[in-house]
Amino acid sequence: RPLKVAVLGSSGAVGSELLKILEERDFPISELVLLSSQRSEGKIVKWKGEEIITKKASKEEFLNVDLVLASAGGSISKQWLSTVKDQNAVLIDNSSAFRLENDVPLVVPEVNACEALKHNGVIANPNCTTILLTLVLAPLNKISPIKRVIVSTYQSVSGAGQLAMEELQFLTKKYLQGDPKESEVLPYSLAFNLFLHNSPMLSNNYCEEEMKMTNETRKILNITDLKLSSTCVRVPVLRAHSESVNVEFDDVIKPSYAINQLKKAKGLEIIEDYEKNRFPMPNDVMGRDNIAVGRIRTDISNSNGLELWLCGDQIRKGAALNAVQIAELLIAKK
Ligand code: 2RA
């Protein structure tokens, strides 16, 4: 039966993409409720030819809801979780609030779909960088167990939200006009610049974003002692993240074998032309479901290692699409 679906945080970058994807994939919805902060209350959104008014979240709005897709931040998700559970509904949450809790599945459908069905009312959508990484690591881990991963990210501004995207365009114009301005959304301007990820710094001198990569990848791949170290960087790209990845395996893996394995995996495509020096770029994946991977080569410093490069749309597969795919798993089971 079609579901009553609430989108919590519907006016943000991820929320807007969620609505687009629900429409594109013809997700079975009997009633769609758009819920947002006070700032966006009353905003009219067109969905499947209808005009829907964005409302402020309240207990009444969740009445008889079946599914809640949340991308309004951890504290908002926590605030409404018991209300969602009271309705016997499922919360698919894009924040980091529940991701590492033992009874909360952390799901990338192409990697660990079966986990989704073990939920107790909440399923966590992983962090964007982790989703993209695990899509590539999971098929490789089947060839030979992964021992260690070193990642450097090149993260687009979309990961910091809609305002940051708009501001990057504004700051870039200003810079080109010879009138550079400071950022009001991010710690520094990204116009012709980049900086280390702006999430809070932890006592081990890794930032939260970097530790999310380690902890979430361990949980999704179910390798509790996986060694993973990352350096996360924000770059002046609008909406697709890139990652440079070094993977060490138990065995020697031929790049050609790894490529064949990745070609068979869902959600991936290979872009690799050494003659033309053509490998994945953010523009290849912007607005697209698949993530692109290429430049898969043996690590010259370690015969059991592979180097590779990937790009994926942060708002889409890195967030909204993954959440809708999780919801589709639940429907398929019903
Ligand atoms: C980013 N962690 O900073 C965000 C996206 N989820 O890119």
Image (spheres, rainbow, N blue to C red):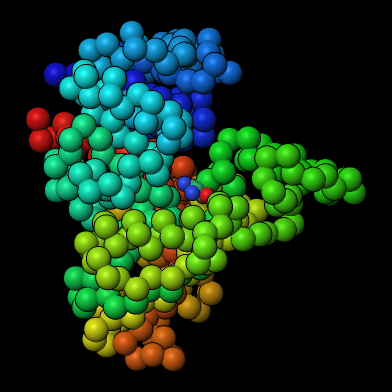
Q: Which of 180 and 25 is in front in this view?
A: 180
Left or right, 35 with respect to 191, comes to left
Q: Which residue is drawn at 24% across and 61% down?
A: 221
In the image, residue 148 sits, relative to residue 166, either above or below, namely: below
Q: Residue at x 27, y 75 (%)?
A: 146
Q: Give x and y (percent) for residue 5.
A: 29, 20
Q: The C terminus lies in which quarter of the figure?
A: top left
Q: Number of callouts in the render?
A: 0
The residue furthest left is 334
Left or right, 234 with respect to 192, comes to left
In the image, residue 209 sits, relative to residue 185, either above or below, namely: below
Q: Give x and y (percent) for residue 56.
A: 46, 13
Q: The N terminus lies in which quarter of the figure?
A: top left
In the image, residue 151 sits, relative to residue 21, either above or below, namely: below
**Can residue 23 be seen by looking at this rendering?**
no
Q: Residue at x 65, y 53 (%)?
A: 236
Left or right, 185 with respect to 18, comes to right
The residue furthest right is 178
The residue furthest front is 203
Q: Give x and y (percent) for residue 191.
A: 74, 51
**Can residue 327 be seen by looking at this rendering?**
yes
Q: Which of 9 and 122 is in front in this view?
A: 122
Q: Residue at x 41, y 86 (%)?
A: 299
Image quadrant where residue 51 sits? top left
Q: Give x and y (percent) for residue 134.
A: 32, 60
